[in-house]
Amino acid sequence: MRIPRSIADIDPLWINTALRDQPTFPDKKISNFSYRVVGRDTGFMGEVIILTLTYQSGSTQHAADRHSVVLKLPTQTGNRGIGETLGVYEREIRFYSELQPELIARTPKPYLTEMDLGDDPDKTLGLLNFINRFPVSVIWWLVRLAQKIPVKKRNYALLLEDLSKFRLGNQLEGCNLQDAKTALAGMAQLHAQYWNQPITEKFSWVIPLKLGAKAGQAVFLDCLPRYIKSNQDTLTPRHLKLLYWLKEHALALFDIYTSLPSTLLHGDFRLDNLFFDDARHEIVICDWQTLMYGPAGLDLAYFLSASLGKDSDENDAAELIQFYKATLATHGIEVDQETLEWSYHAGMLIILHKVIPAEYQNMLELTGERGHQLAITWIERILQKLETVDLEQILHPPGKAKLP
């Protein structure tokens, strides 16, 4: 069917065609719809649009008989080219059409997953492996060159279940321990299903974490001087030590970190992407554009660094890590406590390595004040949680046990 480029391409005929085989919706013709765009300040790569549908029965239009769905389209900003180059739109389409049907963790129900065909995922994976043969400095110029090459825009469209009936998390506000445990229970369920499984053999479009390490380092090195200059009045000697340590040792850290057994990672596991079903004490996980394959500690560090505010302390983090470990055990996955804690702390360094470029790069357009505030607050929280990490030992993970 026709794939829309923007909301201007949507009409009742298109919606009726898209939903005609969905048992969730009444067997009535959609006569009209209204829409509102949500998440403008956080949706760097896509547009999220809620369509409210009005049905018509016979000659009578029933305004009260309504359903709503979520339409996801690529962003209309300059981020579109980067998103397509990174494959985020195709990855999410493939997730909902290929992987989501077997997933145990809760996600929005997909009603439509459409995209123009592009390169075979195996070809893309081969290209990434080829690029990683070059040194970081060369990869940086390849990244810059890719920006200048016009991208042949492909069309992508997702129609998903509207989760507005559930409570959406708020990353800026953070969450309490109970909400954090609810989120970690969902995370553990996701990780346990694919723990140490060769998922990339079945889904070659799921990119291993290690393949992005050199490109990530290239962008980090470009952004680091701008970050230090912008924050020179507030950065402490400890902060500077962390930053210069990453400059020298990030790639070594990635090598050690990705030697751990891996699983399916959400890649953007934070409160803004989680809906809380309070009646069932569960979460529904949204936004699967950046899923990847890597050690579970990365999702764990990602969530705790973004969701626990300055008022939280090491005891809170320790309690939640222990809760995550115990929940994994209920799914049949036993992990070594010392290695899990190392994976969490090393993951926190990798998250700092990822988040600084999100705010201080010059490639992505961060839309709205909230987007900037998210990145700034997040970096502050990470630096606080890294205060006690022993940089002399972080490249020497516990040797007495491995994650299974």
Image: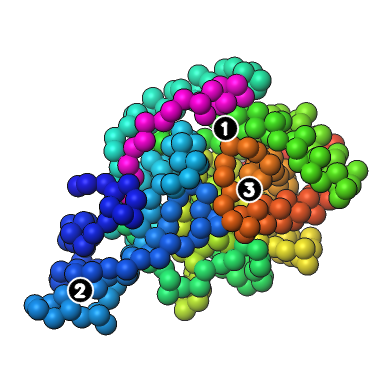
Task: Give the residue number, with chain letter if any, for mark 2.
Answer: 55
Q: Would you identify the image quadrant in which residue 241 lies? A: top right
- Mark 3 lies on residue: 297
* Residue toward you, 399 or 375: 375
Q: Residue at x 81, y 46 (%)?
A: 231
Task: Give amino acid for label 1.
Answer: Gly
For the record, the magenta segment spans 139-157
Q: Which residue is mark 1?
A: 212
Inspect this view and state whether residue 322 appears.
no
User: Crowdedness of circle 1 by 10 Å Cα count: few (<14), some, many (20+)?
Assistant: some
Taking 145 as reference, is 118 above or below it?
Answer: below
> In which quadrant will I find the C terminus?
top right
Spot occupied by residue 57 in the image (x, y as percentages of width and height): 13, 77
Would residue 322 be counted in the magenta stretch?
no
Q: Is residue 371 visible?
A: yes
Q: Residue furthest front?
A: 8
Q: Which residue is pictured at 43% across the width and 53% down the height?
A: 47
Against 143, is 235 above or below? below
Residue at 78 percent across and 67 percent down: it is 311
Element carrying mark 3? helix
Residue type pointed to by label 3: Gly
Q: Earlier in the sequence, mark 3 or mark 2?
A: 2
